[in-house]
Image (cartoon, grey):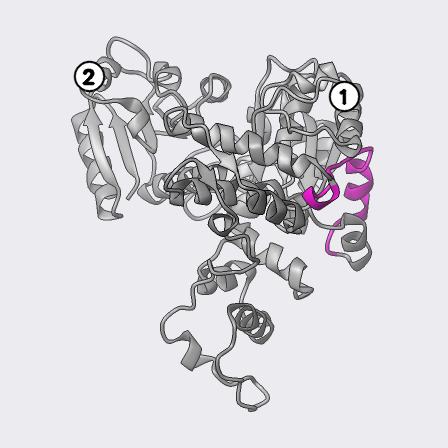
Amino acid sequence: MSHILVVEDEEIIRSALQKMLQHHRFQVSLAGSVQEALDHYNLTNFDLVISDLRLPGRPGTDLIELANGAPVLIMTSYASLRSAVDAMKMGAVDYIAKPFDHDEMLAAVNLILERQRLRKLNPPVISAEPKEVRDASDIEDIIYGKCEAMQKVFRLISKVAPTETTVLIQGESGTGKELAARALHQLSLRADKPLICVNCAAIPETLIESELFGHEKGAFTGAVTTRNGLVEAADGGTLFLDEIGELPLEAQARLLRVLQEGEIRRVGSTQSRKVDVRLIAATHRNLRALAKTGEFREDLYYRLNVMQVKLPALRERGEDVLGLARLLLNKMGSKMGNVEFHLSPDAMQRIQNHDWPGNVRELENAIERAVILCDDDLITGDLLDIEDDIDDIQIPAGLVNQHSAPASGREKPKDLSLEDYFQHFVLENQEKMSETELAQKLGISRKSLWERRQRLGIPRKKN
């Protein structure tokens, strides 16, 4: 259960928020001011802080730094572009204008918590190596890598970062595309400006245009106030669009205008607004192939494909895999009280022989799992449990019987593996379900659904 702190000096609003969030099974704590929140709570214990901007004593934006990494959603009755952008530049994860609709607040809360969950699944790997490329290697959170392929990546990042060139980062899931984007931003002339990161696969298709480009009051059901989007929040800085291959065609057309004209138009607006953003995009999909089939705009592809940074898969990085494993092991040891863990010869052999389809993310998960299960300081091969599986797919109750026979009337084989079940269910239902509905039925995220499609060679349905 996610724990949310609401900091609001108006008792009626504070109480209404508490009831609404508790009704949706969130744990809620309350405070009437920044000082009261500091006096009664450890802010790092919260999954989300929702705070009014104008509070007695200190402004709500002070909580952004005090929360020490916990996301802060700012509420304001003074709904101006300037105050919203200022709050986000200070580090607020989002803002919402009063008076707000409860559905709007709930959607914002769920989106923020989902983003936090996805970040925890792929936390940054911190390393000061490799030393051969000083400019890129000294960046905080830069990807570890001593192999020649990674050295080429570091050199390219160092050359491209100071320019205003649009960059397309390509690589398999888990290779560290967001870390490369952060390095490009930190080495750029915009380093002191905001870096806004957006995972296009994590936002529902119905909301993505509003999230990116903002909307006017009354533009659609639930748009009770005017709201600026994440592109405006990145004004002057860098916009990183992860999984851009999942961007709907309508949003692609709006993004093309940002690149061509340097302006956006909010959903429901007739007026354009100038923005100055540098775009960095990332994908694990083949955009050229998608452009040929009409699933991705060809003109947008050529706008994005000015400079490519290709991140090698972990299986292509030779001895880097052991270096990364040791680095991650030291990181986990520090978290557990500076315990010094070691890899057994069998563990090192398995790490080197495994293909790592999930790349660095999979390696980090394997190391973390082994550390948790380890009874001493020696990590053995059995503890790593590095087998390819899709155990996170949840077969909903009643779904097996409901879809036990394919459309042709033939009986579905009994005792299907989870992978067989996934493939059968997607092929049987993709004509009548959207991608979001398929993911919900399978109990996985849209991003996981698309990754599994690619791995199993199941093409998406054409609209």
Residue 159 makes an appearance in the image: yes
Per the image, label 1 sits on a secondary structure element best described as loop
Q: What residue is shown at x 65% (from left), y 38% (from top)?
A: 321
Q: For residue 316, which numbered disc appears in the image?
A: none
Q: Are marks 2 and 1 in contact (CB under 8 Å)?
A: no
Residue density around tag 1, few if under 14, some if 14–19, many if 20 or more, within 10 Å: some
- Judge by depth and name the residue closer to the eye, 409 or 143: 143
- Name the residue tied to disc 2: 36
Question: Where is residue 412 drawn, in percent x and y?
Answer: 53, 85
In magenta, the rendered stretch is 295-316
Does 417 appear in magenta? Answer: no
Left or right of 51, for residue 280: right
Residue that numbered label 1 is attached to: 164
Which image quarter holds the N terminus?
Answer: top left
Judged left or right of residue 178, residue 319 is right
Q: Is residue 71 visible?
A: no
Q: In the rendered structure, which amino acid carries the disc numbered 2?
A: Glu
**Helix, strand or loop status at disc 2:** helix
Say left or right for 127 vs 338. right
Q: Is residue 30 above or below residue 296?
A: above
Quadrant assignment for the C terminus:
bottom right
- Percent from the top left, x then y, of residue 349? 62, 46
